[in-house]
Image (spheres, coloured by chain):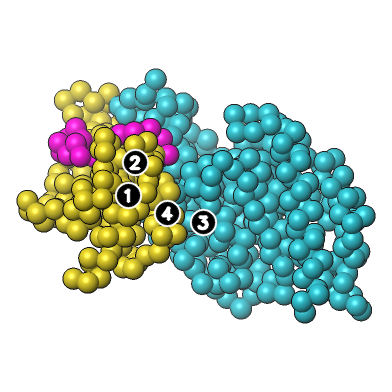
Chain colours: A yellow, B cyan
């Protein structure tokens, strides 16, 4: 892991020095980025990779808008320093659909009115997908707990819970 | 103002040995960062004074939970999710499992670590009262070797602890043998997830004596009521060897009020915290008193 040692360079980042080369897999695609080791994963995704589907809400791990999957685990990308994502396998909202076809969760959010202003939606969909990967047939309580770290100021949550239940039913039937 | 990442160093040595060598090299200069759920919040707000950080997130030596006949050893880098999902912790140390379930939301539970919760030294940390009542021991690692110390007394003041500048918390040990105890925990906060406690409690005890109604081996700890997570030793002394009745509960409530030093802050008031703290201890004692009747 030679790129780790480059993080020690104290230069202020002129000409890319002080940055390190990080290899990661994003939505199934290998990527190499140059980033400061303490750069937030959120900023690497949005600014370096142009994946602006991941949103910044609070920037302090309270709202869940920046949720992504890192090696299959749900994380707040605003709290992950870039260096810790080196070698990781990431899934963002851009990697959820199957080509131009929305996946079951995305379709259910649309049908149930689970998405309104849209800021929380990518994080909600990743948190809900994280739940269904673990528990194919969740109860309403399971869903409430799984999404407790994702705040929504539009929907009042009921349509979101309904969307997750609907996606789970479809996935179980399919 | 937001921090500039160019101002910070972060490195990720591959082994524990390399990390403690770095800490020994420049004591107090390097701050370990595990899942970042506390440090990255300070960083984002431009309030992280340290400029040199060393990642311990991927250290294999800090991971894993091992179970022996007498105790379990939890790697300091174990996440709340790993604590929640561990069968022995769920069955034998439910106060720790419930604290893990109440900390943050799922994303923070996937990144926050038990060692980080100890090192962050918040008096409001949900897992620390559980460690106080289970009388956890900490294994601290440095280039000088390892030492094992009791967690009780580890936090000596607000954000102060008995950790040398060259030391890293490697593991947390819990002695087994609480299956006959009543375990009681509550978190009182604005909501369960993503809310820091106004008051939290972890307590355990059992009934014994000839009539099976006398309180034995009772341990009570509170969070958010003092500069450190607080073990209520005086309350424990007052109720030990007694049977639970209304008079004892009142005595205990008075002793709670005398032991704690709650403050007014953004989350609550000293008055509310004092009332809730003594009510939680009363509820625990009433449940403990009632636990003998069922048997």
Locate residue A83, reporting x and y percent: 29, 43
Q: Quadrant of the C terminus of chain B?
A: bottom right
Which residue range is magenta in the image?
Answer: A45-62
| SS for dot 4 | helix
Q: Cβ–Cβ below 8 Å for labels 2 and 3?
A: no
The residue that mark 2 highlights is A155
**In whole angstroms, how far apart are the C-alphas of marks 3 and 1?**
22 Å
Q: Nearer the viewer, residue B278 or A168?
A: A168
* Left or right placement of residue B130 versus residue A152 in this view: right
Is tag 4's residue or tag 1's residue first in the polypeptide sequence?
4
Output the chain of dot 4.
A
- Magenta segment, prevailing SS (helix, strand or loop): loop
The residue that mark 1 highlights is A160
Give the vertical position of A148 relative to B44 (above or below): below
- Say whether residue A149 is visible: yes
Locate residue B37, reporting x and y percent: 44, 42
Give the class, few, some or many, for how many residues have Cα within 10 Å of label 1's Cα (few <14, many ≥20): many
**Pair 3/1: label in front:** 1
- Which residue is at the far left? A100
**In whole angstroms, how far apart are the C-alphas of marks 1 and 2?**
7 Å
Give the class, few, some or many, for how many residues have Cα within 10 Å of label 4's Cα (few <14, many ≥20): some
Q: Residue at x 80, y 73 (%)?
A: B292
The residue that mark 3 highlights is B101
């Amino acid at each position: 892991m030679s790129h780790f040692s480059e993080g020690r360079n104290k230069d202020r980042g002129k000409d890319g020095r002080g940055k390190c080369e990080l290899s990661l897999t994003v939505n199934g695609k290998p990527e190499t980025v140059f980033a400061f080791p303490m750069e937030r994963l959120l900023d690497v995704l949005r600014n370096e990779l142009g994946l602006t589907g991941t949103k910044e809400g609070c920037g302090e791990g309270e709202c869940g808008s920046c949720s992504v999957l890192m090696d299959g685990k749900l994380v707040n990308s605003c709290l992950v320093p870039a260096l810790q994502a080196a070698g990781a396998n990431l899934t963002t909202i851009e990697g959820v659909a199957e080509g131009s076809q929305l996946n079951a969760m995305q379709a259910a959010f649309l049908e149930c009115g689970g998405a309104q202003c849209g800021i929380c939606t990518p994080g909600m969909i990743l948190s809900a997908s994280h739940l269904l990967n673990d528990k194919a047939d969740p109860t309403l309580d399971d869903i409430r707990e799984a999404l407790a770290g994702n705040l929504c100021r539009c929907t009042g949550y009921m349509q979101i819970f309904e969307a997750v239940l609907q996606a789970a039913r479809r996935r179980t039937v399919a | 103002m937001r921090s500039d990442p160019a101002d910070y160093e972060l490195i990720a040595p591959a082994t524990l040995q390399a990390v403690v060598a770095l800490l020994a090299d420049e004591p107090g200069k390097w701050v370990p960062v595990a899942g970042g759920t506390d440090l990255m919040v300070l960083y984002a707000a431009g309030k992280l004074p340290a400029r040199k950080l060393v990642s311990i997130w991927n250290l294999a030596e800090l991971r894993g939970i091992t179970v022996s006949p007498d105790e379990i050893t939890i790697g300091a880098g174990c996440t709340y999710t790993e604590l929640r999902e561990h069968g022995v912790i769920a069955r034998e140390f439910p106060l720790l499992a419930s604290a893990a379930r109440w900390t943050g939301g799922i994303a923070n539970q996937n990144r926050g670590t038990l060692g980080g919760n100890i090192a962050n030294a918040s008096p409001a940390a949900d897992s620390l009262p559980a460690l106080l009542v289970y009388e956890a021991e900490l294994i601290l690692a440095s280039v000088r070797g390892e030492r094992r110390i009791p967690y009780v007394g580890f936090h000596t003041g607000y954000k102060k602890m008995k950790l040398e500048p060259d030391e890293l918390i490697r593991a947390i040990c819990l002695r087994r043998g609480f299956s006959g105890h009543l375990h009681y925990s509550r978190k009182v906060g604005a909501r369960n997830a993503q809310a820091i406690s106004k008051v939290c409690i972890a307590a355990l005890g059992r009934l014994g004596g000839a009539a099976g109604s006398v309180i034995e081996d009772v341990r009570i700890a509170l969070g958010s009521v003092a500069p450190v997570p607080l073990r209520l030793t005086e309350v424990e002394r007052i109720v030990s060897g007694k049977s639970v009745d209304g008079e004892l509960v009142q005595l205990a409530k008075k002793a709670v009020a005398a032991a704690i030093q709650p403050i007014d802050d953004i989350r609550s008031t000293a008055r509310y915290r004092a009332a809730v703290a003594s009510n939680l201890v009363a509820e625990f004692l009433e449940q403990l008193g009632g636990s003998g009747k069922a048997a």
